[in-house]
Image: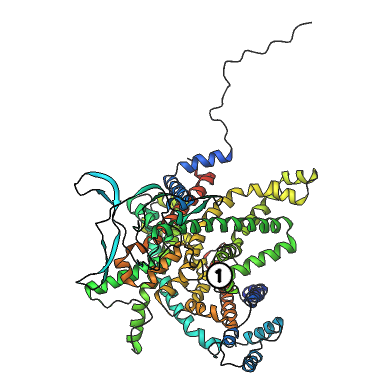
Amino acid sequence: MSQAASPPQITKGRRRSSKDSQSLWQVVWSQFLRHPLARFGMWILGIFFTVSFLGQFIAPYGLNEYSTEVRVPWTPPSKIHWTDEKGSLSRPFLYPLKRQVNNETFRDEYVEDKTQKTYIEFFHHRPESSYRFLGVIPTDLHLFGVQEPTKIYLMGSDDLGRDWFSRLLYGSQISLSLGVIAALLTIGLGMVMGGIAGYFGGWIDTLIMRLVEVLSSIPGVFLLLTIRAIFPNDINPVLIFYIITGILAVIGWGGIARVVRSQILSAKEQDYVQAARALGANDPRIIGQHLLPNTASFIIVAGSLLIPGYILEESALSFIGVGITEPYASWGNMLSLAYSGGFETIDNRAWVLIPGVLITVVVLAWQFVGDGLRDAFDPRRRT
Amino acid sequence: MLPFIFRRLLQFVPTFLLGTVLIFAIVQLAPGDFTDILRENPLIKPEQRQLLIERYGLDKPVVTQYFSWLARFVQGDLGTSFAENRPVWEVIAPRVGNSMILVLLSTLITYLVAIPLGVFSALRPYSFPDRVFSILTYFGLGIPSFFFMLLVMYGMVKLKQNFGWNVPISGKSSGDFTGWRYALDVFIFALPPSIVIALRAISSESRFIRGQMLEVMGQDYIRTAKAKGLGMNNMVYKHAFRNAVVPLVAGIGGLLPGVISGAGFVEVTYSWPGLTPKLLEVLTTKDLYIFVSVTALSVLLYIVGNIISDILLGMVDPRIRYN
């Protein structure tokens, strides 16, 4: 018996084609990274989300801390001194502020009380503003702080004496997360409705598409205000967060549903769907496991472009007072202080405008990321 | 053409009905009604409240209320406002007119600026001015409209303080003028909010036009025209531009519902007496008919706008013919 021929000698190392085939996600990722704006947007969002996540740790004070005995409205940002009297570098410190009337302008102003030098402590424990990290671990550790009665106002204070910087951090938690959660809800709702409409067709399709048309025929602002009016004006502020999220999602699912439906209509007749049906897959399985994942690219792009819109809508609602209310902070909420304080506010207390700037930056970052994703998924724009 | 319009109108009837039913249901979902506020007031006796309720038909079942509203609406009666005891139309007509002023002015500004900007950017893509405009449009899309309005108002105040110019800060007009002077006054007051509204529209429209123009200019027939020696101006405006703006023209009909809703938040910030500030007021009083009738009106306008868009599209795009 002749032995089986030995296999031909194969050169060491696998024979590689000129380019390893990549999965869709790898291609998209590498395309995305080639977009300088998109990378920039991603970095900004990364920084914002990280800082916001650690908000309670980074903020020296709590959300709603002000004292009614020692009133310090509209404190300017604290001056942090790095050199002591002799001119040499020292640990950063600041002085407590005293309120007194300026003899020339007859207005209140804050003067440093140079008798008490208070050092800034890092990793400072502050029992008055203890919190639960990640909602679980109770702690009172803050990144930095000063001993009472000195207060450190990195960005000044508002009319009640609350630290603006701390409120910005707490506000970021609401403003950033609300957009993302609402977008996720919208995508979920849109996928389900669009999937059902596209797959089953017939009267279900007509009904759902009519619903979408009705929802888009009513101007967004009206619908927002009308649904908001269902709930009493002075409702528990925590509930408002969920309500606003829900309203935004319920109004916005139409666009996603339409896209999903058209995708499914075109994919429905393809062979793999017939094969799956022949193998006995039931309808939900076909929709969920086969059709919907193919729409993923559109959904991701549409979703990432939803988020900046939602951030803008939430901040607009909070600005006019029907969104997030006191004592919780949201960037739109805080901006309304600039509006109600009159224009002297902007002159003397420019820090009230910071929330608006932050909103713009975050919205821009999301738009860069969304555009980058859209170009990355577009097969005609491969570089 | 006429049968087409008629058919489209009929198609939209269920949408209209569904939309109004939806709004009616949502408003009725709110617990209590208009007379709740009166309940707090000790001077108003319960019998008087009951009279009011009966007068406005608030004690009838919701379905009856809806149909009686609908019957009156199609005859042109939009209902009565509870809070002001006036027909809804009287209450909202001036507001709608004001919002319309803003929308018309801002649309004018938008197209006057966005079209040249988009075409220019498309003709010199990736050049320095194009990049600058790109960055500006990104800002235009990113900045919240009410925030920008705030900054503009602040800028005006500064202008007034430092230069003494008589610039409008808020509201609709500064005094009792009549005739031409009034019109001019209102126009000047309408400028700042219109510009702010236009900014966002300019940003998105100019990018859209740029994209469309770039796509059209890459087409073969443009290349043929260029090879045959057609001048740049002729080519751009006669051939490329006309094809690029087809979707834009079709989108004009979509502006019609915007006439009613205006640009709500800018109006509120600037204290311009438009529709949205009124709606905010009405939020607290639960003035049922204002909500429902205004929304029904805007649904109507949406439908009309859709039909106009279709007609315009048919006129501009020779590939589409309705018969």
Q: What amino acid is found at the position of numbered circle 1 in the picture?
A: Leu
Q: Is residue A270 left or right of residue A71?
A: right
Who is closer to the viewer here, A287 or A53?
A53
Residue drawn at x 59%, y 52% as measured from the top left? A299
Residue A247 drawn above or below residue A382: below
Residue drawn at x 66%, y 88% as measured from the top left? B57
User: Which quadrant of the view contains residue B71?
Assistant: bottom right
- Residue A109: image location, x then y, percent: 27, 67
User: Which quadrant of the view contains residue A75?
Assistant: bottom left
Residue drawn at x 71%, y 81% as measured from the top left? B63
* Residue corresponding to mark 1: A224
Residue A191 drawn above or below residue B250: above
Residue B206 drawn above or below residue A380: below
- Residue A19: image location, x then y, percent: 54, 30
Residue B310 drawn above or below residue A150: below
Q: How many marks?
A: 1
- Residue A189: image location, x then y, percent: 64, 58
Who is closer to the viewer here, B126 or B57?
B57
Residue drawn at x 60%, y 82% as measured from the top left? B288
Q: Is residue A263 left or right of residue B271?
A: right
Of the 4 image quadrants, the one containing the N terminus of chain B is: bottom right
Q: Is residue A80 left or right of residue B4?
A: left
